Image: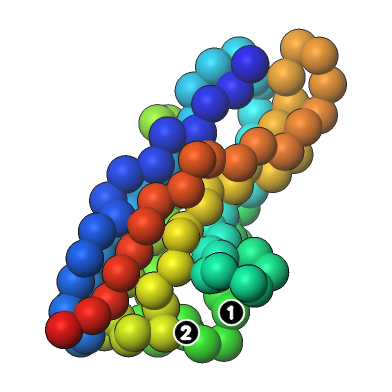
């Protein structure tokens, strides 16, 4: 069993910053990539940013230049530094671990979600 534990969400004013963290724990051999997705009521979950264990990153256009994803492979942890936050960034942010090799096979995993609210 693999668990993703997220932290760092909260309420921030427009223009402010937050840093999300997500640590993977449990029984696994490797993870191909980790990332962050977000979802608002009535909308589909959308990709925000991903990073491979080799450090290759991908961002949705709306966050480029404002958000930075990074990882610490030794700690199986991914971070999302969010700067210049806008009200439209308000959402539940979910951590994802992709292509996790476990003793029972390859699986994808999701965290429980953390609320980010950008409001004055």
Residue carrying label 2? 64
Question: Which label is found at residue 45?
Answer: none
Label total for image: 2
In the rendered image, the quadrant that contains the N terminus is top right
Residue 116, position in %: x, y?
Answer: 34, 64
Q: Residue at x 53, y 70 (%)?
A: 40
Asked if labels 2 and 1 touch by Cβ distance under 8 angstroms, the answer is yes
- Report the front residue among 54 and 83: 83
Label 1, secondary structure: give it. loop
Q: Residues within 10 Å of mark 2 (few under 14, many from 20)?
A: few
Q: Looking at this view, is 41 or 66 the one in front?
A: 41
CA distance for labels 1 and 2 = 7 Å
Name the secondary structure under disc 2: loop
Residue at left offset 60%, top offset 41%: 110
User: 16 left or right of 101?
Assistant: left
Q: On the rendered image, what quadrant is the C terminus found in?
A: bottom left
The residue at the point 81 percent across, 29 percent down is 106
Dividing the picture into quarters, in which one does residue 13 lie?
bottom left
Question: What residue sits right under mark 1 in the picture?
Answer: 60
| Percent coordinates x, y for residue 115 in the rendering | 37, 57
Relative to residue 36, is residue 5 depicted above or below?
Answer: above
Percent of width and height locating residue 35:
56, 55
**Mark 1 surroundings: few (<14), some (14-19) or many (≥20) residues within 10 A:** few
From the viewer's perspective, is 103 left or right of 13?
right
């Amino acid at each position: 069993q693999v668990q993703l534990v997220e932290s760092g969400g909260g309420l921030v004013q427009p223009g402010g910053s937050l840093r999300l963290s997500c640590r993977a724990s449990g029984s696994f051999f490797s993870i191909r990539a980790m990332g962050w997705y977000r979802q608002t009521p009535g909308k589909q979950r959308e990709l925000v940013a991903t990073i491979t264990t080799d450090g290759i990153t991908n961002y949705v256009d709306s966050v480029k230049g404002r958000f930075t994803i990074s990882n610490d492979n030794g700690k199986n942890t991914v971070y999302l530094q969010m700067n210049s936050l806008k009200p439209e960034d308000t959402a539940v942010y979910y951590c994802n671990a992709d292509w996790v090799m476990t003793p029972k096979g390859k699986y994808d995993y999701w965290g429980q979600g953390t609320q980010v609210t950008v409001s004055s």
